[in-house]
Image (cartoon, grey):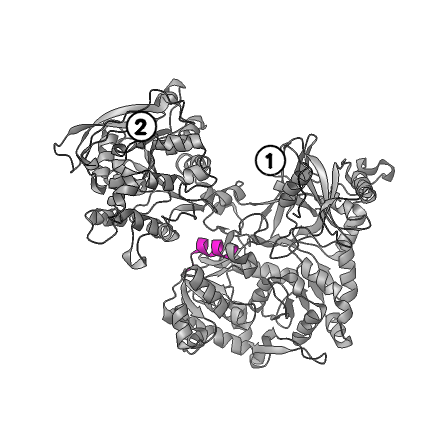
């Protein structure tokens, strides 16, 4: 007798002690007549095993909001949903969860029949009739091939189906997109199919390994328990065999029918995804999104196929259900209604370029300049420049070329081009056709770029040859366009469809009308607080950002901007201002020299300069190399801006001497909202006086001269149109949902402005957390306001030291440590269990320490005294390192989380390495 014909019984365990996380009261069996086509005798009764929390809810007197029908895939069973069962039972608004073991799977009956996709849809329908779900409000929750089965059920039960939640699944495989994934092709190979799926546990073992960290032995044993013999694994074999790997597969027609129906479904949907899945690849998620564009999506970076084991999905599932099926209005709707809108009429982001190109001076006035290497000190090395007329015509032609190539409004275009005239032209051309620019700079590193581009899933990829080679080698998404003209062989090898030169030969033509509320850009964060996040801006928000930057930077026609930070160079043409990027590697801010900055300023007679703190440090370090005419060029600068990380006042004072005519500003903002506040050097000086103790003899116990001043870095008052509030933190460092604008209250900084982001891209959980107060963006930064309405930033929420006396922000203590002679940068971190952490200072020294370890007694004593005198903190240890770990983009944001973990290891007695 073959495995396919066996009916060797499998029964639920008599005791659930060996199944961690299962409440024995959930387990039940149900008998249901089967009307599946595979049944020799229609109506044959089949035994199902379920994990169902209905009895527990009834015992507790709870009325569920509805029923979650949870469907596992292959080769798991209802055990996969134990965390959801628990969370749904304990939730303030409880839900009934019916987690099924499909027939021939888990602890349900082994029927001895080959059940195809159509049979499994009917099976599930037979079950829901038997347990009375057809008249309930049902949310389908599914994983792996359970996604298809649940959608097939939903098609047959549209009145009951209220919402869809899916994790790592596929509804349709397009043969034109390539073959099915390698693991499935291997499992389907005739010579190994039976051996790996049923005769051995190979397929089961591999599936259970697709999780990080690895499953605990007892969890793995629980998953394998129903599949202890080849006969009990027959369903695994059949499930794999029913994969529609080719067009004439027996189940393919039903698969296509379900996929087509899914595109007509308008119910709320949530897709939770593990991007490392080697089976359900990114293309399957994109297919799901096309079919259900209303879906919320969260990609758990680093998570694998077995997502419910890899990450906590129960919490977001409960939150999403509450907001979308219980609350009167979804959180997203509340947020959109509450956030502010500019009162000015919408003016497209690119309108400033068009306006400037229409002026009489357009054929002579310079719009953008690319700098080269200077061969001598006599004149700046201008490699290339475009007038306003040339830039505008180039934009118009390339925009027409993009349309001719097939670019549509809403298409995402990844631009991997160095800052300069080419990148500026491509950005403005893309925005004019209604495309969405994807900006992920190479400073993220190859792993970071891979994650970013995989998540953004651009349809188009425009790059220099090195970027195109990486795209080809690493499989980055998007049809490819080369910035440079390549020879036919290289073009073919790299899969290039067109070059920018070819696009530029297109005659200008009509362009689409721009929708103000359509997506315009996906800008990636620096990755200093975890994997880089995609931040989505609409056309309206990009226009609002342009206006906010113009107001702070005083950029307008006739002014010029030196941008040592690429995004600002791209904003300049929108404001009618000339722009130039210095000769530097913008992904490495410390490569900016004083001479390069001066040459760039001279090239366009710049009035404004923007550079990151790390860039400024190197400019000051190399200022002795400046020639007299270069100092004169810098002397004509009227405004200097720096953002991305705090810039110590002593460095600002040095910078003022180098730029004697410039007003120095250090605006506060982030990728999600820039700028939000602004502060001048004069205000910083005033704030330093205001932060002095009112009664010096009382030391740190004395109130500052201005209440709330001195606790961190003063970043000034909100820019026009912006609002700043504080969400006070409790003893455990958790921010409240209550917002205050009172002075001297430590809490999370919460912002509001027309130019705040639209949302995070494919990060529903992150977006939900950041908009927990509708209309506002919770930044994750901590700080406080002072009595003059100025904001003081004192660190990140997850950098708070959770001491026995309550939360302590790190920046004030760091500033105190940095006043000690011999100390460069200092980081104040908490070591020990939360709620009982002790403060530890990790210092860079001047000159740099040769190796990491405890500071010398003298230095340690001075640091302890300085920190105690300023804050009252008793520092437990002072450590030194050659260099702090920092973010890639700004090279300025110290990674306190990494330093805290390193300090804990260093102080535990083990071998001390560099952090």
Residue visible at 59% across and 62% down in the picture:
587
**Left or right of residue 876: residue 268:** left
Magenta residues: mostly which secondary structure?
helix
Residue 612: x %, y % from top left: 66, 59
Which residue is nearer to you in this view: 384 or 587? Answer: 587
Which residue is nearer to you in this view: 381 or 603? Answer: 381
Determine the residue located farthest toward the right in the rendered image.
697
Residue bearing the label numbered 1: 734
Residue 296, above or below 630: above
Q: CA distance from mark 1 to mark 2?
A: 38 Å
Q: Secondary structure at mark 1?
A: loop
Quadrant assignment, res 60? top left
Residue 110: x %, y % from top left: 23, 31
**Left or right of residue 837: residue 193:** left
Q: Which residues are magenta?
A: 448-458
Determine the residue located farthest toward the top in the rendered image.
59
Badge 1: few (under 14), some or many (20 or more) residues near its Cα, within 10 Å? some
Check if residue 457 falls in the magenta segment: yes
The dot on residue 881 is none
Residue bearing the label numbered 2: 50
Which residue is nearer to you in this view: 580 or 102? Answer: 102
Q: Secondary structure at mark 2?
A: strand
Residue 553: x %, y % from top left: 65, 62
Q: Earlier in the sequence, mark 1 or mark 2?
A: 2
Check if residue 622 falls in the magenta segment: no
Which residue is nearer to you in this view: 746 or 344? Answer: 746
Q: Is residue 311 visible?
A: yes
Q: Is residue 158 visible?
A: no
């Amino acid at each position: 007798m073959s495995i396919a014909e066996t009916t060797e019984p499998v029964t639920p365990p008599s005791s659930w002690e060996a199944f961690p996380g299962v409440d024995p009261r959930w387990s039940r069996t149900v008998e249901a007549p089967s009307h599946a086509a595979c049944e020799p005798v229609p109506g044959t009764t089949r035994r199902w095993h379920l994990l169902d929390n209905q009895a527990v809810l009834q015992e507790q007197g709870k009325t569920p909001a509805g029923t979650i029908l949870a469907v596992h895939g292959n080769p798991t069973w209802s055990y996969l949903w134990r965390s959801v069962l628990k969370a749904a039972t304990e939730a303030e608004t409880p839900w009934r969860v019916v987690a099924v073991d499909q027939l021939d799977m888990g602890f349900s009956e082994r029927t001895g029949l080959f059940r195809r996709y159509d049979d499994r849809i009917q099976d599930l329908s037979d079950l829901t009739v038997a347990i009375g779900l057809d008249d309930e409000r049902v949310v389908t929750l599914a994983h792996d091939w359970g996604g298809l089965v649940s959608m097939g059920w939903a098609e047959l039960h549209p009145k009951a189906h209220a919402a869809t939640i899916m994790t790592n699944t596929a509804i349709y495989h397009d043969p034109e997109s390539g073959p099915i994934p390698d693991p499935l092709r291997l499992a389907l190979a005739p010579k190994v199919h039976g051996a790996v799926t049923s005769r051995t546990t190979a397929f089961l073992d591999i599936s259970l390994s697709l999780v990080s960290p690895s499953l605990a032995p007892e969890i793995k044993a629980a998953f394998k328990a129903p599949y202890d013999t080849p006969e009990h694994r027959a369903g695994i074999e059949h499930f794999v065999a029913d994969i529609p790997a080719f067009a004439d597969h027996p189940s393919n027609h039903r698969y296509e029918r379900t996929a087509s129906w899914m595109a007509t479904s308008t119910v709320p949907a949530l897709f939770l995804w593990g991007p490392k899945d080697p089976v359900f690849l990114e293309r399957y998620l994109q297919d799901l999104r096309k079919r259900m564009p209303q879906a919320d999506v969260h990609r758990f970076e680093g998570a694998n196929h077995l997502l419910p084991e890899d990450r906590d999905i129960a919490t977001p599932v409960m939150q999403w259900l509450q907001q979308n099926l219980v609350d009167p209005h979804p959180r997203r709707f509340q947020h959109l209604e509450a956030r502010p809108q500019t009162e000015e009429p919408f003016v497209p982001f690119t309108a400033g370029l068009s306006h400037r190109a229409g002026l009489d001076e357009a054929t002579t006035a310079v719009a953008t300049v690319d700098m080269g290497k200077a061969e001598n000190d006599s004149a700046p090395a201008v490699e290339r420049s475009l007038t306003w007329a040339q830039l505008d015509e180039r934009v118009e032609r390339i925009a027409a070329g993009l349309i001719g190539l097939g670019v549509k409004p809403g298409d995402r275009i990844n631009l991997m081009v160095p800052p300069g005239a080419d990148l500026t032209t491509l950005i403005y051309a893309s925005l004019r056709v209604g495309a969405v620019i994807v900006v992920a700079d190479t400073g993220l590193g190859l792993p970071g770029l891979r994650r970013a581009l995989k998540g953004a899933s651009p349809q188009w990829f425009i790059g220099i040859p090195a970027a195109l080679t990486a795209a080809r080698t690493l499989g980055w998404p998007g049809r490819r366009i080369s910035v440079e003209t390549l020879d036919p062989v290289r073009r073919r090898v790299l899969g290039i469809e067109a070059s920018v030169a070819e696009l530029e030969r297109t005659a200008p033509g009509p362009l689409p009308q721009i929708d103000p509320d359509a997506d315009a850009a996906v800008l990636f964060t620096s990755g200093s607080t975890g994997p880089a996040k995609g931040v989505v801006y609409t056309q309206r928000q990009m226009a609002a950002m342009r206006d906010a930057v113009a107001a702070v930077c005083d950029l307008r026609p006739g002014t010029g901007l030196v941008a040592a930070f690429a995004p600002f160079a791209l904003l300049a043409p929108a404001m009618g201002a000339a722009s130039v990027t210095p000769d530097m590697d913008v992904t490495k801010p410390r490569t900016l020299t004083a001479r390069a900055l001066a040459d760039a300023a001279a090239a366009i007679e710049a009035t404004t300069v923007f550079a990151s703190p790390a860039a400024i440090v190197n400019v000051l370090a190399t200022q002795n190399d400046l020639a007299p005419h270069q100092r004169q060029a810098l002397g004509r600068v009227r405004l200097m801006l720096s953002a991305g990380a705090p810039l110590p006042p002593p460095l600002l004072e040095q910078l003022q001497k180098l730029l004697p005519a410039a007003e120095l500003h250090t605006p506060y903002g982030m990728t999600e909202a820039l700028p939000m506040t602004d502060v001048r050097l004069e205000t910083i000086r005033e704030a330093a006086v205001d932060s002095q103790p009112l009664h010096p003899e009382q030391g740190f116990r004395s109130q500052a001269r201005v209440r709330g001043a001195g606790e961190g870095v003063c970043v000034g008052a909100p820019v026009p149109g912006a609002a700043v509030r504080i969400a006070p933190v409790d003893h455990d460092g958790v921010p409240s949902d209550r917002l205050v604008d009172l002075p001297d209250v430590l809490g999370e900084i919460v912002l509001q402005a027309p130019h705040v982001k639209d949302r995070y891209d494919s990060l529903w959980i992150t977006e939900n957390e950041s908009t927990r107060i509708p209309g506002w963006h919770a930044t994750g930064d901590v700080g406080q306001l002072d009595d003059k309405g100025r904001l003081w930033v004192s660190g990140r929420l997850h950098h708070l030291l959770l001491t026995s006396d309550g939360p302590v922000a790190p920046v004030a203590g760091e500033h105190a440590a940095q006043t000690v002679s011999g100390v460069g940068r200092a980081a104040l971190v908490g070591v020990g269990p939360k709620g009982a952490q002790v403060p530890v200072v990790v210092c860079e020294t001047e000159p740099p320490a040769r190796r990491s370890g405890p500071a010398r007694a003298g230095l340690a004593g001075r640091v302890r005294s300085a920190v105690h005198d300023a804050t009252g903190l008793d520092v437990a240890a002072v450590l030194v390192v050659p260099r702090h770990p920092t973010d890639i983009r700004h090279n300025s944001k110290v990674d306190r989380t990494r330093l805290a973990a390193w300090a804990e290891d260093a102080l535990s007695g083990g071998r001390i390495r560099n952090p």
